[in-house]
Amino acid sequence: MINVMNLSKEFPKKDGTVFKAVDDISFEARDAEIVCLLGVNGAGKTTTMRILSTVFKPTSGTAEIQGFNILSQAQQVRENLGFLTGDTGLYNRLRGSEFIRYFGRLYSVPEKTIDERIKEMADLLDMHDFLDKKIEFMSTGMKQKVSIVRSIIHDPPVMIFDEPTSGLDILTARNIVSFIRQCKQRGKCVLFSTHIMREAERLADRVVMIHKGKVLANGSLEELRQQSNQTDLDDIFVHFVNQFTDEAEVLAHEF
Amino acid sequence: MNFRKVGVVFRKELLEVLRDKRTLFATLILPVLLYPLLIVGFNSIMTRQTEVLQEQGATIAVMDSTNNDVSRKLVADMSRIENYTFVPYSASTAKLYDEKDIQAVVSIRDSVGIDGTQFYKVYIQYDKSKDKGRIVFDKLKSSISETEKGIQKAQLAKSGMNPEFMELVSVRERDTSTAQKKMGMLLGMFLPYIMIIMLLTGASTVAADLVAGEKERRTLETLLVSSAARQELVFGKYLTIITLAMVNVIVNLFSISFSLKFMLANAAADMSGVQMPISAIIILLAAMIPLATFFAALLLSISTFSRNMKEARTYEQPILWVAMMMAMISFLPAVEMNNLMALIPVVNIALLFKAVMINEYAVSHLLITIGSTLLLDVLAVWATIKLFTTESVLFRSEDDGGSIKAVHQNKRNFFNPYYGLVYFSIALIVMYYLGSYWQIKDLMAGLQKTQLLIIALPVWIILRVLKLKEKDILRLKAPKIKEALLIPFIAIPAAVIVSIVSQLINLVFPFPPKYIEVMSKLFTMDASLFKVFIVMSVLPGFCEEYMFRGFMMRFFEKYGDRMAVLISALLFAAFHLDPFRFLPVFLLGLLLGYLTIRSGSIVNSMLSHTINNGMALVIVTYGDTSWLKPFISSSESLRFWLLLPAAAILFAALYLFHKVTS
C-alpha cells in the first residue's frame, strides 16, 4: 500500500531559482495492484520514487508506505519496500549470488530464507545458469535480473521498480513483466515507472500520468479512455498533455 | 547501531578488496619487497660505491715551486698513493682540470718565519661537490700530514729529543651508543616518514573506491534504500579502511624488522644483533592505530563528498602532501617531542616513532598522541556520518556554478567557493613574492603598496569589470550610530584578549628571537607616529576588511553565514603567513566577520580592525609610560588579570551590538 500526499520536491538551480521536479503529487497504490507512473523523460518519475524510498526528502507533503511515514519512520519504510533503481550499478567483483546475499544480510534476512528465496526467484526469472558468475561478466539482462532479486530479497509487501525493462531484449523484458504480474498475484503492491506506453498498457491496473512534476490523470485504462475519448494509450497520453500545455512542447520531447 | 550489519558491510568490502589485485599489490606485496631492497640494497650499494671510489685512480698535477728536500719528499710520498698518477703542472693543466681529466692540482710554496724557519704551504685545488674530489683531497691531505710528521720526528731525533713526542696527545674515542641505537636513530629518521606515507596510501587506495566509487558505479543508491542505517554503512566502510591501513602497517613493520634482523646482519658485520625490539613494535602499533583510524575517517569523508573516484583522488592529494610535510619533521635535527608537539597530528607520531626507536620516550607523550589523534578521529567520523545523511552531497550533480558561462548568465555566480579559493591563492602568492620583495626594499613603502595594490586594488578592479555594485557586494555602507559607538567597546577588549592569547601561545611555544626582532621592527619604524599609525592601523583596517570581510566572505555565503565567517577567518589567518599568529588572527577574523554580517556594514569591521591594530601600536610605543604601567608587565606584554575585565566588557558590548542590530 502506497499513499502519496501532496508531495513536492524542489532542487536549487545554478541561477539561484528553484526547479520543481515534483509539484504537489498525490496518488495511491493498493495491495495486489500494479500502478504505473507514466511520463516522458524528466517528468519527475524517478524523483518521486526516490522520495518514496527515503533517499530524497520531500520539500513539502509526505507519503506512507504500508502505513509507515517516509519522514518519521524511514527505517520501517525501507524494511517494507523493495526498490529497483533506474540505472542500477552492481558490484562487479562479486558473484550474482554473493551480491544478492549481501543485501539479504543488510535486510537481516536469515541465511536459510535467503537461500530459499534465491532459488525460488531464480526459477521464476530463469537465472540458474549465471547466478554464480562474476557480475562483471554478465550481460545487461542478467544484471537486471540480479538487481530485481536483490531489491526484493526481503520479500517486501511494497515494490517499486524504476523503468525495470529499459534497455533489455524482448525475451528478458517479457520474463520480467510476467514476474511482476506474479508479484501482484501474491498480493504485492507494485509501483513501476516507464515511458513505454505499450508496457503500461500490458501491465498496469491503474496509470498515473505525470508531466513536468504534476499529475495529469489518474485512473484505470478504461477510465482514461472514457475521459479522453481515445483508445490508444499514446493518444490518451498526448490528449492529457495537450490539456496541460500546448502541443509544440510535447513534440519537442522524444518518447 | 546494529553491529551485525556493520560486520556484513565490512566483510563484503574486504571480499571485494581481496579480489582486487592492485590493492593487494599496494598493501601486501610492495612493502614486503620494498624494505629488503631499501635497507639491504641501499646499504650494500653504498659500501660498494665507496669502495669503488676509494680504489679508483686519479690524475694529479703538481707544481713544486720550492723544489727542496722537503717539498720533493712531499711529492714523492704522495706519488706512493695507489693508482694515482702525478704529472707536472703545465700550460694545459687548467684545460685538463676543466675537462675532468685531472682531479686535483697541488701546488707547493714556502715562506720564511721571523726566526728563519721555513714554512710550507700546499694548495690543493679540487671539486668538493664530487665524491671523487673529496676522496682525492682526503688521501692527499693524509699523505701530506704523514710526511710532515715524519720530517718533524726526524728533526726531533736530530736535536736529541724523543721522536715519540709527536704522539704527545692522542685522541681515542669510545662510543657508548650501541649498534642497535645507531640503527635506531637512522631508522627513527626515515621510518616514520615511510610508515606514515604507507599508512596513508594504504588507506587511500580503498577509501576513494568505497563511497565515491559506489557513486561512480551507481551502486550507492541501492545501498541507501536497504534497511541498513547510514551509520552502519559508514562504520562498515570505515573499518575496512582501517583494516587495510593497519594490515599495511603491520606488513611494513614485519618486513622492516625482518630485513633488519636477518639481511642487514649478513650484509654488515657490525650490524649483527641489531633488531627492532618487540616492545617498540607494540608501542608503534598502538600509536599507529589511532592515526590509521583518523586517516580512514578523513579519507572516507573525502570519498563521500566527491562525485567520483577521480575527484576523490584529487582531493586526497593535498592531504597526502600535508601529511608528507608533517611526517618530514623526523628528518629535522633538534626537534624533539614535547607536550605541545604531541598534540599535532602526524607530527606527534613521527616524533614519537623517533623517540621509541632510540628507546627514549615518555609515556605521557604516547598518551597525548593517542588521545589527541582519537579526538580528531571522532570529529572526522562524525563529519562523515553527517555527509552521508546529506542528500545534496550524496547526489551531487555536475555543479557548473563555477563555470565562466554561469558567471556570464549572472555576475553574482562569480561568488562561489571555487573562485574564492582560486582568488585567495593568487593573492597569497602575489603577496608572498611581490609584497615581501617590496617590503625588503623599503618597509614603510612596501607595506603601503602591499595593502593598497595587492590587497585592495584587485578587488576594486574585479568588481568594476564584473559591473557589480561595490556597495552591495562589499556591504560598503554607513553603520548605525549606535553600532559604531559600540565598536570601541568591542575592539579594545578584543585586542586585549587576542594579545593575551598570543602571550599564552608564546608561553607554550616560544617565539624565536629572530621573529620578535622582525615584529618589533614593524612598530618602531623610522617615521612619525602618525604615519606609522596610518600604515599599521588605518590601511590594514580598510584594505584587509575590504578584501576579507567584504569580498572573500561573499564566496562562501552559499554554505550559510556561519560557515562564511568561519572560512573567511581561516583564510584571513592563513594570509598572514605566520604560524605564531594564526590563532589570534583567526579569532580576530571571526569577530570581524560577525560584526560585518550581523550589521550589514563593513565599516564596523574596518573600524574595529583599525582600533585593534592601533592598540598594538599604543602598547609598543607607550609601554614604558607611567599611565600604561599598571596594565603592562615587562617587555610589552599585557598582564593576565586584564583577561577577565576585557572578557566582561567584550561580552556586554557584543550583547548590546546584537540587540542594536536585530
Image (cartoon, coloured by chain):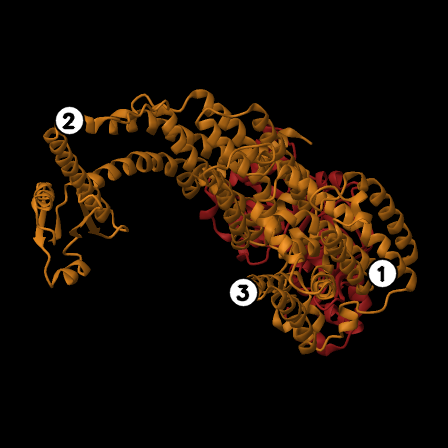
> Does label 2 or label 3 sit earlier along the sequence?
2
x then y, percent, for residue A177: 62, 51
Q: CA distance from mark 1 to mark 3?
A: 37 Å
x then y, percent, for residue B23: 44, 41
Q: Are marks 1 and 3 in contact (CB under 8 Å)?
A: no
For numbered disc 1, what is the local secondary structure? helix
Chain at numbered mark 1 = B
Question: Label 1 crowding class (10 Å Cα cut-off): few <14, some 14-19, many 20+?
Answer: many
Q: CA distance from mark 2 to mark 3?
A: 65 Å
| Chain drawn red in the picture | A
Residue at the spot 49% in from the left edge and 41% down from the top edge: B329
x then y, percent, for residue A90: 54, 47
What residue sits right under mark 3 in the picture? B437
- What is the quadrant of the N terminus of chain B in the image? top right
Residue at the spot 64% in from the left edge and 39% down from the top edge: B381
| Number of the front mark, 1 or 3 | 3
| Chain drawn orange in the picture | B
For numbered disc 3, what is the local secondary structure? helix
Closest to the observer, A123 or B338? B338
What residue sits right under mark 1 in the picture? B599
The relative height of residue B235 versus residue A219 in the rendered view (above or below) is above
Residue at the spot 81% in from the left edge and 57% down from the top edge: B595
Badge 2 and badge 3 in a common chain: yes
Type of the residue with mark 2: Met
